[in-house]
């Protein structure tokens, strides 16, 4: 009986010693660093050029937008109903056709309609705002449509705008205002898209590059386009793909960009 008890105690001590040494050996092996959590979305930016003037125009355009797979759409020069022209509202009609949330920023009066820039997104909208951009006397008024959307991992701000295409000094003033808006909304990374009135190699674009990275650089054949997409330089977003797309019905060229977001 004593021998049996002695053997049992010895075995128990040996097992405990092995368990401790095994635990120590396991603890010494460093684990692999956790992979960052990421998500991605696809956005489209295009200038409608005041070409969506009836329901059939909007239906064709909406069908084309859906075919691109875009989850967020920035549209410039889209019209809205007014008291003098109450019959048709391209923004509301497109909102319905896309079945998305949206926001609109009026820039100017155009042939009886309100004209401006819009954002459409399939995800919830948290806030929106209209920012007028500086314009000189006698110049066409400009605006920036701003919206914050819940994009899964992060709440991301987007902007749709249409800058002066004739006067560099006007464009530069408008870009300075966009940079000021970005700084005032530091809690949200802002993706800015739209018609910048010059190529991505222009002087106003160079000013944008102080705070943003231009997605056009990732796409072939977009360097000369006036349609740009800018991402914040915060290390949390990068371009997975970007390409030029054509909407033949309006002879309009846009940019389709897929962006990865890191938590």
Image: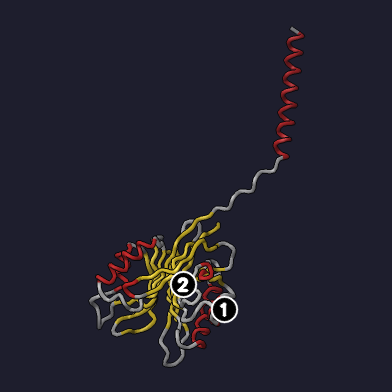
Q: Which quadrant of the structure image shows residue 234?
A: bottom right
Q: Which mark is residue 193?
A: 2
Judged left or right of residue 112, residue 238 is: right
Location of the N terminus (image quadrant): top right
Q: Which residue is mark 1?
A: 206
Q: Which mark is residue 224?
A: none
Q: Residue 243 location, x and y as percent?
A: 46, 66
Q: Residue at x 56, y 74 (%)?
A: 183
Q: Residue 23 location, x and y as percent?
A: 71, 33
- The answer to whether residue 215 is above or below residue 77 is above
Say how many tags the image has: 2
Q: Residue at x 48, y 65 (%)?
A: 242
- The answer to whether residue 137 is above or below residue 47 is below
Q: Residue at x 51, y 71 (%)?
A: 216
Judged left or right of residue 56, residue 242 is: right
Which is nearer the eye, 128 or 61? 61
Judged left or right of residue 29, residue 70 is: left
Q: Residues within 10 Å of mark 2 (few under 14, many from 20)?
A: many
- Its colouring scheme is secondary structure
Residue at the limit of the structure toward the front, as seen here: 221
The secondary element bearing badge 1 is classed as helix
């Amino acid at each position: 009986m004593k021998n049996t008890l002695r053997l049992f105690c010895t075995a128990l001590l040996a097992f405990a010693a092995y368990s401790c040494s095994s635990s120590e050996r396991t603890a010494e092996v460093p684990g692999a660093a956790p992979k960052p959590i990421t998500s991605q979305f696809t956005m489209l930016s295009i200038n409608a050029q005041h070409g969506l003037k009836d329901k059939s125009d909007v239906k064709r355009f909406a069908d084309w937008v859906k075919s691109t797979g875009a989850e967020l759409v920035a549209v410039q020069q889209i019209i809205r109903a007014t008291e003098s022209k109450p019959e048709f509202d391209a923004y509301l009609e497109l909102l319905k056709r896309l079945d998305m949330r949206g926001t609109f920023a009026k820039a100017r009066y155009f042939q009886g309609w309100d004209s401006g820039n819009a954002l459409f997104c399939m995800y919830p909208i948290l806030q929106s705002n209209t920012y007028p951009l500086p314009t000189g006397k006698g110049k066409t008024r400009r605006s920036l449509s701003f919206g914050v959307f819940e994009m899964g991992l992060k709440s991301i701000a987007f902007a749709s705008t249409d800058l002066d295409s004739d006067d560099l000094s006007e464009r530069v003033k408008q870009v300075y205002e966009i940079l000021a808006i970005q700084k005032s909304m530091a809690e949200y990374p802002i993706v800015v898209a739209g018609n910048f009135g010059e190529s991505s190699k222009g002087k106003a674009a160079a000013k944008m590059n102080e705070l943003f990275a231009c997605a056009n650089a990732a796409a072939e054949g977009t360097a000369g386009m006036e349609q740009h997409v800018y991402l914040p330089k915060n290390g949390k977003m990068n371009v997975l793909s970007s390409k030029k797309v054509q909407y033949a019905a309006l002879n309009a060229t846009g940019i389709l960009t897929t962006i990865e977001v890191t938590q």
